[in-house]
């Protein structure tokens, strides 16, 4: 390749010169710019392939006006074969052989493909990290025209052959010389050939391999382009390569095609990283639901944690593909492994105790409580246990009752205890009547109340750790905070709908009399044990009016105070207790809604389906 640079009216050239394209009178390549001796007035220059174009006139002639359109546009790209949406529409009106010739020419040559579907507003001349120069909608519509044609099968077969036999060997054999040469990586996934998942060995795998083998800088450029994609284009990339993973699982080919599987998952990992910063798609778009049925995921996890330095493949290196069911299964597996470890240690300590070498150690965490003193009995015993004992399997014994705890006693224990502890009489939580949900009380009666929050956190964690579903009336915000995710206005609406809608109305109001209508300052009124008090949301908030320009800041501060800063000590104590009982590495895999549903059960019931499967007996009927 070579470069021409026009500075004022002086032309400089450097680079390859095997065909004399530098215009210096020889074929010697130059590493540094050399000034041309051309005695002309130069208007435009163009360097392409092994030739150069210059628009100029002699000094004796009338000086030409500066050409506003780039030479590339003036030549209408006739120097390089390429595809555009308009050209595809045109050739599709001709004979099938004519279309095939066009496809063969472009899809067999990387420069032709990289020059296809370019933007029409000259933005393709500024290709870089923030601009691919490709009109992705034209790419999509162009390939869809081919796919919807009556001869689509013939076209797709031809495109497959061209890409596999000519294009892939070319872009695999040498690294892309320039950022523009990366365009094919964003164009090809829309090609109908990539919808043929059965060609994954000869089409998808070479493509992904070439992409993953790019050096860090060009790979970062492609990631940047993906981050700027419209949803439809980003989703297409994910859908195509995720389907390869699904196909490998369904056919059981993943067992013998582990290299291909790992490459596809590595690409999905990059897409997931891009999506994490752009939030284009919901996280469950990456879930591979076939995993639970086709893979021994418990065994995979066991091998993964017992050989952390082992370089063998593990699905656990790609937790973003796990759905809620798989995550719950892994959390249960992790808890079971931890419990077994604690039980084995207890049995070993019992052996040492018999030798007089260790104190007595029980294999279970046993809580013996009375029904009429449930809260105090539980507090006294939990405070006496060392932290590791919380990792043992839980057994509950009600004094004076002989029922063996096979799970039912534990469930009843948690239901009774948490129902009691969450009562308003303790003053630890506030119930929001409209949503019937609880939130941390912003003000404490006594200094040791923080310790009680820690205790409730331990109990909630123990319930999850032991697989007990308990109706905890907390909003989604609690689970977001447990997973260190930020809370937003929507979370406040979930807890206090009217309060949330009032804040939304601030953003919806567009009239110029905003300050007169709302008369707000950066302050909020709070109730402290029946006494109203005004507090600032920011320093000197009482003198700062809420305006149309700063209303978003006011809303953010309001939500942050309500859900975070005003209850920080209470929540941090709860969180400490929760993680003391559930210290699983699997917890970070969960989305907040998934953790919530695991704790309280899925409360979204399909009552119509329930009724459909119901059989009424005796005198009972639908409208009884």
Image (tube, helix red, strand yellow):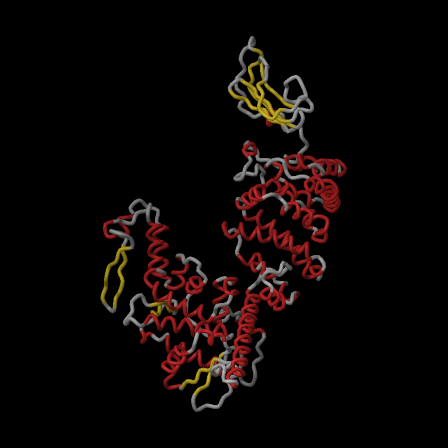
Position of residue 535 in the picture relative to residue 411 (left or right): left
Q: Residue at x 48, y 64 (%)?
A: 593
Labels in figure, total: 0
Q: Is residue 330 above or below residue 553?
A: below
- Relative height, residue 121 to residue 232 (above, below): above
Assign the N terminus to one quadrant of the image: top right
Tell me where residue 415 appears, x and y as whole percent.
44, 78
Q: Is residue 140 visible?
A: no
Rendered view: 114 above or below 21: below
Task: Specify whether 472 is left or right of 147.
Answer: left
Residue 560 visible in the displayed image: yes
Measuring 44% from the left and 87% from the top, which residue is drawn there?
A: 398
Q: Quadrant of residue 456?
A: bottom left
Horizontally, residue 455 falls left or right of residue 63, namely left
Q: Residue at x 35, y 72 (%)?
A: 451
Q: Is residue 296 above or below residue 12?
A: below
Q: Is residue 454 left or right of residue 237?
A: left
Quadrant in which residue 167 is drawn:
top right
Asked whether 314 or 388 is in front, the reply is 388
Name the one closer to the observer, 12 or 208. 12
| Residue 227 drawn at (x, y percent) | 53, 46
Q: Nearer the viewer, residue 500 or 394?
A: 394
Residue 165 spot, x, y in % from top left: 75, 42
Residue 39 in the image: state x and y as whole percent: 58, 12
Residue projecting furthest to the right:
97
Kindly identify the residue that appears in the image at 35 percent across and 63 percent down. Answer: 568
């Amino acid at each position: 390749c070579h470069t021409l640079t026009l500075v004022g009216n002086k032309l400089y050239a450097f680079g390859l010169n095997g065909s004399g394209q530098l215009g210096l009178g020889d074929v010697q390549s130059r590493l540094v710019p050399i000034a041309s001796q051309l005695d002309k007035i130069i208007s435009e220059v163009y360097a392409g392939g092994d030739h150069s174009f210059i628009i100029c006139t002699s000094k004796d002639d009338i000086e030409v006006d500066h050409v506003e359109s780039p030479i590339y546009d003036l030549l209408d790209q006739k120097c390089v074969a390429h595809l555009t949406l308009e050209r595809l529409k045109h050739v599709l009106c001709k004979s099938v052989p004519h279309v095939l010739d066009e496809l063969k020419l472009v899809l067999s040559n990387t420069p032709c493909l990289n020059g296809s579907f370019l933007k029409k507003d000259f933005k393709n001349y500024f290709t870089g990290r923030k601009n691919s120069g490709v009109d992705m909608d034209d790419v999509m519509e162009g390939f869809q025209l081919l796919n919807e044609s009556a001869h689509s099968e013939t076209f797709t077969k031809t495109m497959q052959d061209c890409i596999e036999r000519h294009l892939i060997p070319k872009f695999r054999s040498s690294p892309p010389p320039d950022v523009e040469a990366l365009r094919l990586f964003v164009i090809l996934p829309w090609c109908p050939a990539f919808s043929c998942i059965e060609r994954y060995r000869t089409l998808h795998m070479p493509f992904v391999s070439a992409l993953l083998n790019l050096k860090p800088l060009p790979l970062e450029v492609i990631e940047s382009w993906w981050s700027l994609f419209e949803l439809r284009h980003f989703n297409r990339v994910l859908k195509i390569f995720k389907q390869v993973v699904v196909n490998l699982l369904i056919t059981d080919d993943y067992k013998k095609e582990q290299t291909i599987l790992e490459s596809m998952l590595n690409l999905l990992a990059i897409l997931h990283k891009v999506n994490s910063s752009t939030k284009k798609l919901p996280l469950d778009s990456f879930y591979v639901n076939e995993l639970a049925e086709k893979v021994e995921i418990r065994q995979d996890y066991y091998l993964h944690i017992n050989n952390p330095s082992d370089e063998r493949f593990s699905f656990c290196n790609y937790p973003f593909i796990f759905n809620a069911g798989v995550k719950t299964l892994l959390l249960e597996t992790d808890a079971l492994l931890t419990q077994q470890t604690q039980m084995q240690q207890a049995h070993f300590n019992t052996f040492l105790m018999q030798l007089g070498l260790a104190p007595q150690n029980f294999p279970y965490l046993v809580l013996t409580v009375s029904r009429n003193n449930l809260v105090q009995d539980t507090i006294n015993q939990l405070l006496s246990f060392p932290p590791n004992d919380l990792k043992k399997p839980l057994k509950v014994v009600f004094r004076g009752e002989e029922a063996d705890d096979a799970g039912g006693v534990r469930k009843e224990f948690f239901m009774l205890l948490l129902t009691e502890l969450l009562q308003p009489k303790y003053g630890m939580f506030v119930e929001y009547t409209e949503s019937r949900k609880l939130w941390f009380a912003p003000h404490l009666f006594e200094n040791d109340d923080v310790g009680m929050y820690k205790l409730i956190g331990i109990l909630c964690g123990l319930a999850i750790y032991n697989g007990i579903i308990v109706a905890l009336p907390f909003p989604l915000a609690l689970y977001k905070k447990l997973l260190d995710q930020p809370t937003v206005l929507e979370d406040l609406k979930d807890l206090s709908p009217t309060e949330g809608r009032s804040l939304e109305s601030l953003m919806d109001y567009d009239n110029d009399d905003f300050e007169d209508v709302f008369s707000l300052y950066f302050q909020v009124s709070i109730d402290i044990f029946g006494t109203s008090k005004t507090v600032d949301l920011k320093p000197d908030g009482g003198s700062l009016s809420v305006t149309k320009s700063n209303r978003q800041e006011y809303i953010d501060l309001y939500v942050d105070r309500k859900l975070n800063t005003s209850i920080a000590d209470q929540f941090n104590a709860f969180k400490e207790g929760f993680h003391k009982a559930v210290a699983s590495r699997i917890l970070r895999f969960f989305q907040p809604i998934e953790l919530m549903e695991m704790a309280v059960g899925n409360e979204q019931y399909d009552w119509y389906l329930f009724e459909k499967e119901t059989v009424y007996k005796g005198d009972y009927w639908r409208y009884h």
